[in-house]
Image (cartoon, rainbow, N blue to C red):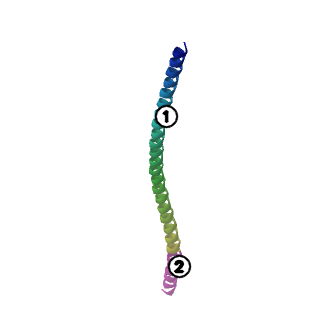
C-alpha cells in the first residue's frame, strides 16, 4: 500500500513539474510577444512623430511666408503711396501752370 501511495505521489509530483515547465515556456513566449509588440508600437510612434514634425514644419513655413508677404505689402504701400501723392501733386502743378 505504501508503494502505491508513493507511486501516486511521484506521479503527482511529475505532473506538477510538467505543468510548471509548460507555464515557464508560455511565459517566455508571452514575454517574447510583448517585446515584439513594444518594438512595433515604438516604431509606429516614430513614424507618427515624423509625420507630425513634417506637418509642423510646413505650418512654420506657411506662417513665415504669410509674415514676409505682409511685411513686403506694407513696405510697398509705404513706398508707393508717397510716390503717387507726389505724382498727383506734380500733375496739379503742371495743370495750374498752363
> Callout 1: 10 Å neighbours few (<14), some, many (20+)?
few
Circle 2 packing at 10 Å, graded few (<14), some (14-19), many (20+), is: few
Q: Position of residue 11 (x, y in %)?
A: 49, 20
* The N terminus lies in quadrant: top right
Q: Secondary structure at mark 2?
A: helix
Q: Which residues are magenta?
A: 78-98
Point out residue 70 in the picture as x, y percentages from the top left corner.
Answer: 52, 67
The residue identified by callout 1 is 24
- Does 83 lie within the magenta span? yes
When the figure is inspected, residue 75 is found, relative to residue 45, above or below; the finding is below
Residue found at x 47% / y 43% = 35
Tell me what residue is drawn at x 55 percent, y 15 percent: 2
Q: Nearer the viewer, mark 1 or mark 2?
A: 1
Q: Nearer the viewer, residue 87 or 40?
A: 40
Q: Which mark is residue 38?
A: none
Find disc 2 in the rendering and name its residue: 82
Q: Is residue 32 magenta?
A: no
Tell me which secondary structure the magenta stretch mostly adopts. helix
Q: Earlier in the sequence, mark 1 or mark 2?
A: 1
Q: Position of residue 45 (x, y in %)?
A: 48, 48
The residue at the point 48 percent across, 61 percent down is 62
| x then y, percent, for residue 19 | 49, 27
Amino acid at each position: 500500500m505504501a508503494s502505491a501511495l508513493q507511486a501516486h505521489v511521484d506521479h503527482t509530483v511529475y505532473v506538477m513539474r510538467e505543468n510548471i515547465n509548460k507555464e515557464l515556456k508560455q511565459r517566455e513566449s508571452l514575454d517574447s510577444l510583448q517585446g515584439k509588440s513594444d518594438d512595433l508600437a515604438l516604431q509606429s510612434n516614430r513614424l507618427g512623430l515624423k509625420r507630425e514634425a513634417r506637418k509642423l514644419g510646413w505650418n512654420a513655413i506657411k506662417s513665415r511666408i504669410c509674415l514676409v508677404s505682409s511685411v513686403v505689402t506694407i513696405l510697398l504701400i509705404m513706398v508707393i503711396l508717397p510716390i503717387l501723392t507726389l505724382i498727383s501733386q506734380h500733375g496739379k502743378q503742371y495743370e495750374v501752370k498752363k
